[in-house]
Image (tube, rainbow, N blue to C red):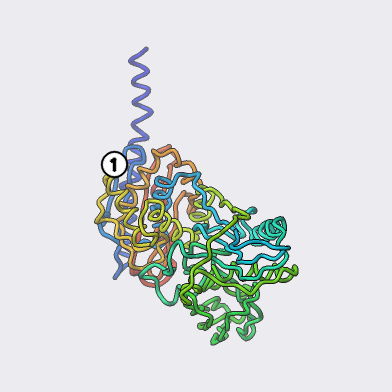
Amino acid sequence: MHFRKLLWLFAAIIPLFAGAQTRIQNIEKAFNRFLADEQCKYASASLCVLDAGSGKLLYGYNQNTGLATASTLKTITAATAFSLLGKDFRYQTTLGYSGRIENGVLKGDLVITGGGDPTLGSWRYEQSRENVILNQWVAAIRAAGIREISGSVIGDDSAWGTQTTPEGWTWQEIGNYYGAGSSALTWRENQFDIHLRASNASVVKTVPAMPYIRIVNELRTGAAGSGDNAYAYLPPYGNLAYLRGTWGSDIRKSGISVALPDPAYDCAFRLQDTLKKLGINSVGASTARLLSLEQKKVPAVAQKLSTITSPSLSEIVYWFEKKSVNLFGEHLMRTLAWKSGREPGTREGARTLINFWSAKGIDRNALNIIDGSGLSPANRVTTYAMASILFQAQKETWYADFYKALPEYNGMKIKSGTISDVSAFAGYHTDRNGNKYVVVINVNNYSGSGINRKLFQVLDELK
């Protein structure tokens, strides 16, 4: 009986093994067809497939060649953040005041001290929405008996310095919502909307109103079907935005989202404006950066009024990967350095990330990382290094949250990545027989459009 059971077991396993082998053979053929495609004539492409159980390389092509990653880099940033910060990590933002309160008058300033929270004022979480935060602050101010402020409302963004965007980001990106810079006092995901009229590409309004920003509209009306090719050119800390490109005459979108040039100022401005409407007047709004330009310092906080705690890291990573929020990645990268005792900048964050994975056996030379989101075209990471990190992630206590955050494309749990002439996917797949794979596929410098369909045709062979 025992012998018969063994025979039955072998009979069951052999077809599964053979099926897995056939899939790898088929994916090799499919990838060779992809490489021979006219769109790949001048391209660099790579594919890495690992056995998810053992980490064994099942198929690799150019797997040790560094390529621009686009947003697939977010998988590495997220895995590092989970490892070094913990899935329950939360940011905090405090509201306090300097000076003293006399007969309802604050003889000092209100100070909002940023703690790096990328979700403050974000619409993605019920507890972090702009009106919820402002109402909480107003309630705390009223509870303290403040009816008038002799000073200003100050946004203290000093914890992370003044460089908001990573090195290597392009001028075309940084004025638009997906290229918004990070700040220790981030607000409303550091973006605002410009509504446009489809018939003539004119500006209808901004949401919210931005009285301190001037918009110069150089947009042209595009042909029907041409869609959204509008870009905002608005530098960090600037107050003059140029709109350039085309806006399709039949487009149904209300407009475009633009990067907020000075989120700390906008945060202080919104609170100051809200208080003014309620009859609590102040001198105006300012920031730590603006004060430093006048060779002044943020006044010491004498009393805290309110502390805002962010959603957990798991909740942040969910939207970071699910909707590919670049801003979250840049905050996480800077936080990695900050909480490791390093200067809280992108470069030090990248160094912290690389050192961490190098200590776990990943070749540091395979991780040429410039930012946390993958927006920089200068990132260069091998598909084997990325796949190896995804393999190691499966062993961690936070893996369930990491896996949950991955989007689903083509019937697989994989993160996509797209920037100019770069398309990539990275994640996991279980075939119909239960064989599990880690897969990373990437193509740079391809020609034409519609490349993702052809990448999916390669990945389909794992099904």
User: Looking at the picture, which amino acid does disc 1 mark?
Assistant: Lys
* Residue at the image position 53 percent from the left and 54 percent from the top: 319
* Coordinates of residue 381 in the picture (x, y in percent): 31, 58
Position of residue 458 measured from the top left corner of the image (x, y, whole percent): 38, 55
Judged from this view, the residue extending furthest toward the top is 1
Q: Is residue 243 left or right of residue 391?
A: right
Identify residue for label 1: 56
- x and y percentages locating residue 99 in the rendered image: 60, 63
**Residue in the foreground of this view, choosing between 290 and 178:** 290
Residue 358 in the image: above or below residue 433: below
Nearer to us in this view, 292 or 425: 292
Q: Is residue 445 above or below residue 356?
A: below
Above or below: residue 88 compared with residue 237: above
Q: Foreground residue, 432 or 251?
A: 251
> For residue 9, which quarter of the picture?
top left
Residue 76 shows in the view: yes
Q: Residue at x 67, y 61 (%)?
A: 101
Q: Is residue 29 visible?
A: no
* SS assignment at label 1: loop
What residue appears at the point 60 percent right and 59 percent down from the top-left corner? 96
Q: What residue do we see at 75% from left, 69% from top?
A: 279
Q: Quadrant of the N terminus?
A: top left
